[in-house]
Image: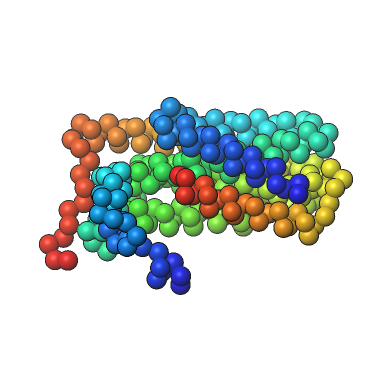
Amino acid sequence: MYTWFYLPNYPETVKFLSEDEREAVLADLPKAAPTMAAKTFNIQQALSLFKDPTFIPFLMIWITHGIGGWGISFVLPTVIYELGISNTAFSQLMTMVRPTQAKIQAQVT
Amino acid sequence: MDKQPPFTLVFVILHSLAFLIHTRRLSPWVAGLGVEVEQIVCYVLLITINSPIAKYIFVMIATAASQSFFAIIWPERIRAAKGTTTAGIAIGITNASCQLMGTVGPQIYQSKFGPTYKISYICSICLLSACIGAVLTSWYFVIKGDKKRTEEGVEEAEVAPKTL
């Protein structure tokens, strides 16, 4: 709900930027980036996504890495337990560090 | 406390890679492939070694590598999707497929495979090898698409519809 109402949709609608800053932000975006002027839903574009040769490989990347790569986090508790130190409450508290980092990363990238 | 080092390492690795990519010293594809290979090496080592401390270190590196990967490839995925509608659907489908990690992931890492998790690691290595194949294929098609567009001229911005 909060995102729907308070996050700006496009650089053009942001209130906290001055005109110069807005132009700088827009100039930094690639030309084919989503624009405010585009139609809400373009069927041709939607179909072009499925015809695009990169669609399947990208999907495969996300599926294979999602399962094969992220699964390692399920092992972490066992490995930590094997180390001989375990304090569930405290280690749970420390997992909070992760979303915080993710947020910072998202802003940087 | 013990969970902090892995995620701190994610933070450090991802930021250094992001810096190199942003300053165009490193291609995101090369970085992505490097991260995948690093992860496979970690899994192989995790199968072969028994020392808990060494295991912890390799799990830490593998976690860091796995979490950095999507963030590195993400901008390329969005760049490959031309247009507002396409980008929207591409983001939706990609994120939806990511949910598989929550459903299939625990199946591979069932506690009955523990505490060595050898079968799980072998499964992961297979999946990651497939992932390297997928990365190479996407890379090939993205380069091909880029070349085609440069031949046709500059990538065109979407034209505003007349009635707004």
As drawn, B16 above or below A67: above
- x and y percent of residue B135 in the render? 47, 36
Left/right placement of residue B144 relative to residue A98 reads left
Q: Quadrant of the C terminus of chain B?
A: bottom left
Find residue A51 and report its horizontal and vertical position in percent. 32, 47
Give the residue drawn at x 71%, y 39%.
B59
Q: In the figure, is residue B114 to the left or right of A109?
A: right
Q: Looking at the image, is A107 positioned above or below residue A89?
A: above
Residue at the image position 30 percent from the left and 43 percent from the top: A28
Q: Position of residue B94 (x, y in %)?
A: 46, 52
- Residue B153 visible? The answer is yes
Q: Residue B84 location, x and y as percent? A: 30, 55
User: Which residue sits furthest right?
Assistant: A84
Number of disc labels: 0
In which quadrant of the rendered view does residue B62 lie? top right
Residue B122 visible in the snapshot: no
- Which residue occupies the extreme left position in the image? B162
**Residue at 29 percent of width and 62 percent of height:** A13
Q: Would you say A61 lies left or right of B2 here? A: left
Classify residue B141 by image quadrant: top left
Q: Quadrant of residue B124?
A: top right
Residue at 32% x, 62% y is: A15
How is the protein colored in the picture? Answer: rainbow
